Amino acid sequence: MTSTETMRLDKWLWCARFYKTRGLATDEIGKGRVTVNGQAAKPARDVRPGDTVALRQGPVARTVTVRALSGMRGPAPVAQLLYEETAESIAAREAAAEQRRLAPEPAATLQEGRPTKRDRRDIERATGRVAAPGWDSRWSASIDE
């Protein structure tokens, strides 16, 4: 860990392993998914220990407090020492995960829509119609027929 007082936001997010690359961190900041101390931020914004960073990783929203700065990206256990997630953020994240787990499968709620190939064949069999002739009735160029 470095002894510098400030660090670029995009670099800190990358070092703390919130995003896989600095480019991804920059993109997320640019989309407005990262705030520092409640204010919109830019990738070059300086962060200091004690700052509060709110970010989104996919569907997961997190609020963390910067504890330390690091000049390089290290292993996950070291990166977790760079921040502390707030209690409200942990509770909200766990509640959201539970809700996603209990939510019904979206495809199971579909009542209408285009039938699958299997459904179409079942419908044709039930109504007695055959849309196209089967393999047996196809024309063949072989001599033995």
Image (cartoon, rainbow, N blue to C red):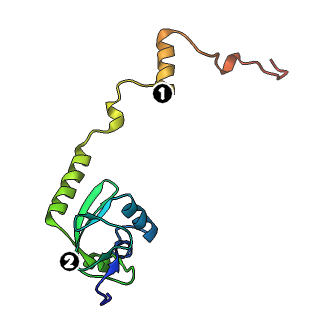
Q: Quadrant of residue 143?
A: top right
Residue 26 against residue 48 in the figure, above or below? above
Name the residue located 18 percent from the left edge and 56 percent from the top edge: 92
The percent position of residue 61, horizontal first and vertical second, equals 26, 58
- 34 or 99, nearer to the observer: 34
Amino acid type of the residue tagged 2 in the rendering: Gly
Q: Quadrant of residue 18?
A: bottom left
Marks 1/2: CA distance? Answer: 56 Å
Q: How many marks?
A: 2
Q: Of residues 88 and 120, which is closer to you in this image?
A: 88
For disc 1, the marked residue is 116
Residue 113 coordinates in the image, percent (x, y): 42, 25
Disc 1 vs disc 2: Cβ atoms closer than 8 Å?
A: no
Q: Quadrant of the C terminus?
A: top right
Q: Image height check: is 130 above or below 5?
A: above
Give the residue furthest to the right. Answer: 143
Side of 36 where 9 appears, left or right? right
106 up-or-down from 67: above or below: above
Crowding at mark 1 (Cα within 10 Å: few <14, some 14-19, many 20+) = few
- Inspect the image, locate mark 1, and give the three-letter code of the amino acid beneath it: Thr
* Quadrant the N terminus occupies: bottom left
Q: Residue at x 31, y 39 (%)?
A: 105
Residue at image position (37%, 63%) is 29
The secondary element bearing badge 1 is classed as loop
Sequence order check: which comes first, mark 1 or mark 2? 2
Q: Residue at x 48, y 27 (%)?
A: 116
Can you give x and y, in whole percent of width and height, for residue 57 in the image?
A: 33, 60
> Mark 2 highlights which residue?
50
In this rendering, the label closer to the viewer, 1 or 2 = 2
Dot 2 falls on a residue whose secondary structure is loop
Residue 80 badge: none
Q: Residue furthest bottom?
A: 3
